Amino acid sequence: MKRTALALLLLLVPFALFARSRTVRSGPIDTPAAWLGQRALGHESFARLVASSDVVALGDITHATHELHAAKQSLVPRLVAHGFRVIAFEAPYSEYKALDAYVLHGTGDPEAALNLPPYWFWDTNEILDVVQWARAQNAAGLTPPIRIAGIDATSPRVTAAEVVAYLSRVDPAYASEAASIYHCIREGYTGTNRCRTAISTVRPTMLSKRDAYVLASSLDEYEEMLYAARIVEQGERVLVAHRYEKDPPMAENVLRFVSRGQKVILFGHNEHWGRIAYQLEKVESIPSAGSYLAIALGSRYFALGSMVLDGTFLAVQYEPGVRSGSIRTHAMTAPSPDDYGVLFSLAERSSMIVPLRGPLPSWLAGTHRMRFAGSTVPILEVPADFGAKFDGVLYVRTSTPTQLRHWPTF
């Protein structure tokens, strides 16, 4: 996506969020149990429901709940059967190319590729099972093949090194200049206009030398490295603003697949994939990647959020006054009476998928409480409007920890 297109999306966000806000207190006058029972879907029915979508996001209420990862093991094959071919992770762009190479060609070690401490929550038996399943499908001749992608721009130094390595083969003279330009985002970088401006010159230079670079490599490799230069631009902004600049690049990187006619399954946290802005510790809202995707794709984007009522999960805990942390098992805090988990528990099911498009009954419409955790604790509780935020919800009564393969410290 060009900068102008992304800028247009940013301008449209307030209007789209207003249009999407549809917490109409109407619908059938049923008990919660009856309404939920009538609407609940199994995994195969859900896959049929979203088959015409371009992008389906599978959101996590915690990053390390086994039941949500197990749902991906079940849902991914069903979505692939309906033409979805890209599994895109909230994970770093360059590092996850190793997983893509494995599912495409069987090269490399997927267990080693998943062992990436900052993204420890994907390093599980459940996700490894999905990756190995995808490899088996491709090896059996699935056409087009399944691809794996990281869509997070959080490690631009790795991608910058990749760009420079490519330039060293196709244009050694400019490779030295590019390396000098990218040096400004070395460890400890906090942002300067001079660095940002310099980084933004690499991609236009590569565009101006397109024919020579394609001749010296290939069209596919050239286009991949050209986009890698864009990832470095995105990542420079993420290094400076961190969470406040993380979502626009993820949306842009997803839309790149869609523009090429590919249907995408997204793995990541609820808050990134919801159709509206989200809140963390601070009061101000952060436009989500899902809000940009909803503007760009409309009903062709389906955001499946998730929730749990109780149980345990994994997250990093930092001790007060100590900079190091470790992954531990944590219990969900007790829900308030108005918590979404309590409302959905009235159906008396261990798990279910409930579509939310259309008018909602009065007991579900509007704002209720929601608890969630990211890769770290504490558990946060915030007001949320599920009818505006998600197109559907995967409810799990009791969370248990994921089957983590490695336990890094931080």
Image (tube, rainbow, N blue to C red):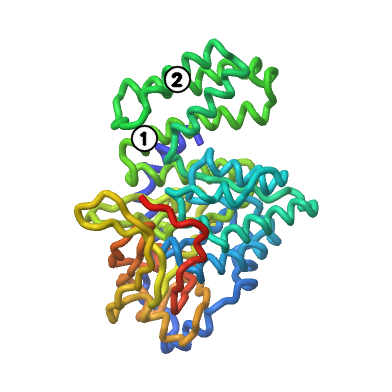
Residue at the right extreme of this rendering: 141
Q: Is residue 321 visible?
A: yes
Q: Secondary structure at mark 2?
A: loop
Q: Earlier in the sequence, mark 1 or mark 2?
A: 2
Q: Is residue 29 visible?
A: no
The residue depicted at 63 percent of the width and 19 percent of the height is 213
Q: Amino acid at mark 2?
A: Thr
Q: Quadrant of residue 199?
A: top left
The residue depicted at 56 percent of the width and 41 percent of the height is 256
Relative to 359, does residue 328 appear above or below in the rendering?
A: above
Front residue of this view, candidates 31 and 375: 375
Residue 298 — which label? none
Q: Which residue is mark 1?
A: 237
Residue 309: x and y in percent read 39, 77
Residue 143: x and y in percent read 76, 50
Residue at the left extreme of this rendering: 321
Asked if the residues shown at circle 1 and circle 2 are in contact, with their CB atoms under 8 angstroms apart, the answer is no
Relative to 383, does residue 344 appear above or below in the rendering?
A: below
Q: Which residue is mark 2?
A: 201
Residue 243: x and y in percent read 34, 46
Relative to 389, does residue 362 appear above or below in the rendering?
A: below
Front residue of this view, candidates 115 and 36: 115
Relative to 90, does residue 306 appear above or below in the rendering?
A: below
